[in-house]
Amino acid sequence: MYCNECGTAGDPKEKSAGHFWIELLLWIQLLLWAVTASIVLTLRGDFTATLLVATAPLSYSLWRVFRKTKVCSHCGSSSLISARSPVAVLAQRVRD
């Protein structure tokens, strides 16, 4: 692959969408909710709110797992094209 931003030709790396810290905060929120809710909901017997809160971190985690993009291993740009494309070949000739 050839990077249009920095001109690096090489193997790209995969990057997950979103941010790890948001995912971590969502899971911490779920754990805190579960501890609090386990006391309150045991008394009430209503678990629908817990199911709704559990969908946020699970959905975000699944989105991050399945939404990966290839980025330049040098600069991190997602502006990659095939190294054999005419644009990349011409750009490499100009750079050399």
Image (tube, rainbow, N blue to C red):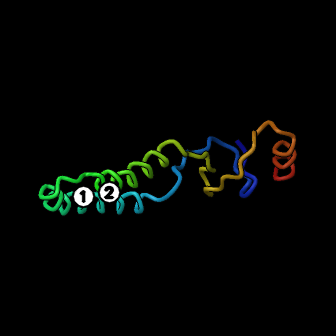
* Quarter of the image where one finds residue 62: top left
Along the line of sight, the residue nearer the viewer: 94 or 48: 48
Residue that appears at 29% across and 58% down? 30
Q: Is residue 44 above or below residue 9?
A: below
Along the line of sight, the residue nearer the viewer: 57 or 11: 57
Q: What is the x, y in percent for residue 83?
A: 76, 39
In the rendered image, which quarter contains the N terminus? top right
Label 2 crowd bin: few (<14), some (14–19), many (20+), radius 10 Å: some
60 left or right of 89? left
* Quarter of the image where one finds residue 46: bottom left
79 left or right of 71? right
Along the line of sight, the residue nearer the viewer: 83 or 31: 31
Residue that appears at 61% across and 56% down? 76
Could you tell me which secondary element the residue under label 1 belongs to?
Answer: helix
48 left or right of 61? left
Residue under label 2, please give it: 27
